[in-house]
Image (cartoon, rainbow, N blue to C red):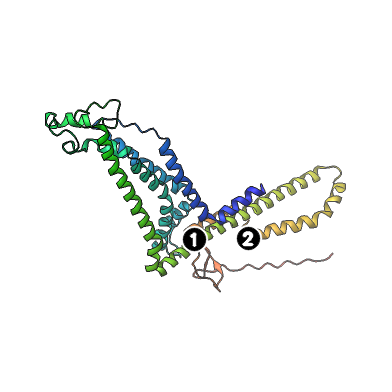
Amino acid sequence: MDKFRMVFQFLQSNQESFMNGICGIMALASAQIYSAFDFNCPCLPGYNAAYSAGILLAPPLVLFLLGLVLNNNVSMLAEEWKRPPGRRAKDPAVLRYMFCSMAQRALIAPVVWVAVTLLDGKCFLCAFCTAVPVTVLGNSSLAPSLTPPELARLLARVPCPEIYDGDWLLAREVAVRYLRCISQALGWSFVLLTTLLAFVVRSVRPCFTQAAFLKSKYWSHYIDIERKLFDETCTEHAKAFAKVCIQQFFEAMNHDLELGHTHGALAMAPASSAAPATTDGAKEEREKLRGITDQGAMNRLLTSWHKCKPPLKLGQEEPLIGNGWPGGGPRLPRKEVATYFSKV
């Protein structure tokens, strides 16, 4: 368990590198999925374009959503976007920075899918086989003998060599080479454009908006770290709360058993020696509770954290009152109780 905990802590501390690795693995997986995919063009005029568009667009959308789901910052972005402003205003620039950072990683796998699809050429061939210029590449003298529906039905069979019977009008190999050449040209153009766009976004943009970029990056990291520290503090509090609750339960059961035992005096003797250690341990656990010792108080604390987070201003001299904000509200009067003991 210690090894798994160390690995988990390493992944948390290197979350950006970990997410980059996940995106790289998804990109390789998308290429492998496409190579293993059995592309079957319907070879019908009304279905070729729809089938090709689905193959070209649906898997990238799924990969994009999967990349967002695997990113741990999605819930943080949604929480920051939907939380009430309270005393801490929401900065749209920080939200845009967080979304752009996640979207850039999530777009890697879809871009690879589209590039591989265009470079392969099967999808483009299926979609635009009916748009081949027969008068230029084929027998132009025989083309007018066919009506437009008949010509479209004949050209729609170009991706399917086993059923294509129009070599007398247009050689299938000529049409395939023509369409694949265009598809590969579009594929390399798409790769070049996406590479240039990524270069501009990652390298050139921060140079012109360096101050705004640094502010957005800093507060994005702050929100992430604050959430992690809050979760760790809540986990520590929950462990201490459960430990004290269980200790109280066992102490109460032990007390009931001692009262019902006929030799209670003998049973109390060994317990007295362990009392100081138990008291010290309980005191240490109660210090970890930070004064929150019941369910209602903890629920109010969590609600206050969600609705009204503390302002980003340190060094407050006024004590926190009410919902956790310094000053600005009525102070509850202190109750002093004096207890007197008399020796008899």
Q: Residue at x 30, y 25 (%)?
A: 162
Q: Nearer the viewer, residue 248 or 175?
A: 175
Question: In the shown orientation, is residue 168 left or right of residue 14?
Answer: left
Q: Position of residue 266 (x, y in %)?
A: 88, 47
- Left or right, 208 with reference to 319: left
* Percent coordinates x, y for residue 194 in the rendering: 35, 53
Q: Tell me how far mark 2 sits from mark 1, CA to CA.
A: 26 Å
Foreground residue among 215 and 313 = 215
* Residue marked by disc 2: 291
- 242 to the left or right of 63: right
User: Mark 2 Cα within 10 Å, few/some/many (few <14, many 20+)?
Assistant: few
Which is more toward the observer, 68 or 249? 68
The residue under label 1 is 223
Q: Quadrant of the C terminus?
A: bottom right
Residue 128, label in figure? none
Question: Which element type, helix, strand or loop, lies under badge 2?
Answer: loop
Q: Residue at x 32, y 40 (%)?
A: 121
Amino acid marked by disc 1 = Ile
Tell us which disc is closer to us: 2 or 1.
1
Q: Is residue 121 above or below residue 192?
A: above
Q: Is residue 12 above or below residue 88?
A: above
Q: Secondary structure at mark 1?
A: helix
**Mark 1: few, some, or many residues within 10 Å (few <14, many ≥20)?**
some
Amino acid tagged 2: Gly
Q: Position of residue 156 (x, y in %)?
A: 24, 32
